[in-house]
Image (cartoon, rainbow, N blue to C red):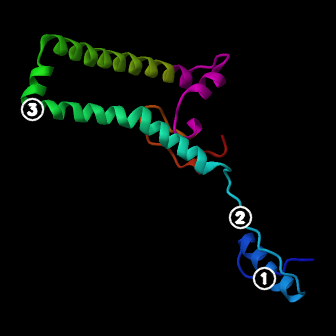
């Protein structure tokens, strides 16, 4: 049995036409096969993900927003202007700034070494770094403007 050559490049459309026209013409009433999802259990895993996102992230963030509203503007200002809170905020933001500076410097050094030198384990190190896109398609490291992905197929 050959599937008739019907218009439409989609194989699902051709299969549907085959079942509707050919099989009903010879007296068989077969159910039309339904398309299966690519990811079985998608709805269940999405439900678990949203449940844990809500319970572990969104509810505590909502509590952080609602609690200061209960104090009012003067109570909130009085709570955050104590010396202990100001010292903790200064420490937190100072350490975040220091970590960002250290990470930027280390990232610059690692990027320089990966681009300029050959060494054993370079492929493993390159595969561990996060980068959106192929590293072979970057023109140079000074400008962060990538070439089109199809333009570097020869490398």
106 relative to 51, above or below: above
Q: CA distance from mark 1 to mark 3?
A: 70 Å
Residue beneath the point at 59% across and 44% down: 45
Q: Which residue is mark 1?
A: 20
Looking at the image, the residue that sits furthest to the front is 70
For the point 22% across and 31% down, the residue is 67
The region drawn magenta spans 113-136
Q: Position of residue 152 (x, y in %)?
A: 61, 45
Q: Seen in the image, is 130 located left or right of residue 108?
A: right
> In the current view of this chain or complex, which residue is farthest to the left?
74
Q: Are marks 1 and 3 in contact (CB under 8 Å)?
A: no
Earlier along the polypeptide chain: callout 2 or callout 1?
1
- Mark 1 or 3 closer to N-term? 1
Give the class, few, some or many, for how many residues have Cα within 10 Å of label 3's Cα (few <14, many ≥20): few
Residue 151 or residue 17, whichever sits in front: 17
Crowd class of label 1 (few under 14; some 14 to 19; many from 20; radius 10 Å): some
For the residue pair 43 and 95, the one nearer the viewer reads as: 43
Q: Position of residue 19 (x, y in %)?
A: 81, 78
Residue 85: image quadrant is top left
Q: Quadrant of the C terminus?
A: top right
In this image, 104 relative to 133: left or right? left
In the rendered structure, find residue 35 and report the number of the disc placed on it. Answer: 2
Q: Which residue is label 3 attached to? A: 73
Could you tell me which quadrant the N terminus lies in? bottom right
Disc 2 secondary structure class: loop
Separation of disc 2 and disc 1 at Cα? 16 Å
At numbered mark 3, what does the secondary structure look like: helix, strand or loop?
A: helix
- Judging depth in this view, the residue of 41 and 20 nearest the camera is 41
Separation of disc 2 and disc 3 at Cα? 57 Å
């Amino acid at each position: 049995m050959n599937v008739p050559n019907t218009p439409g490049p989609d194989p699902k459309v051709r299969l549907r036409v085959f079942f509707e026209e050919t099989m009903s013409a010879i007296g068989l009433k077969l159910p039309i096969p339904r398309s299966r999802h690519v990811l079985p259990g998608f709805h269940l895993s999405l439900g678990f993900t949203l449940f844990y996102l809500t319970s572990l992230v969104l509810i505590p963030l909502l509590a952080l927003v609602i609690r200061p509203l209960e104090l009012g503007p003067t109570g909130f200002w009085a709570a955050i202007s104590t010396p202990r809170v100001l010292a903790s905020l200064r420490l937190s933001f100072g350490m975040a700034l220091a970590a960002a500076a250290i990470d930027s410097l280390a990232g610059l050094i690692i990027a320089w070494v990966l681009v300029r030198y050959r060494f054993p384990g370079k492929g493993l190190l390159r595969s561990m770094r996060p980068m959106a896109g192929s590293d072979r398609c970057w023109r140079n490291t000074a400008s962060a403007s990538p070439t089109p992905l199809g333009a570097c197929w020869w490398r």
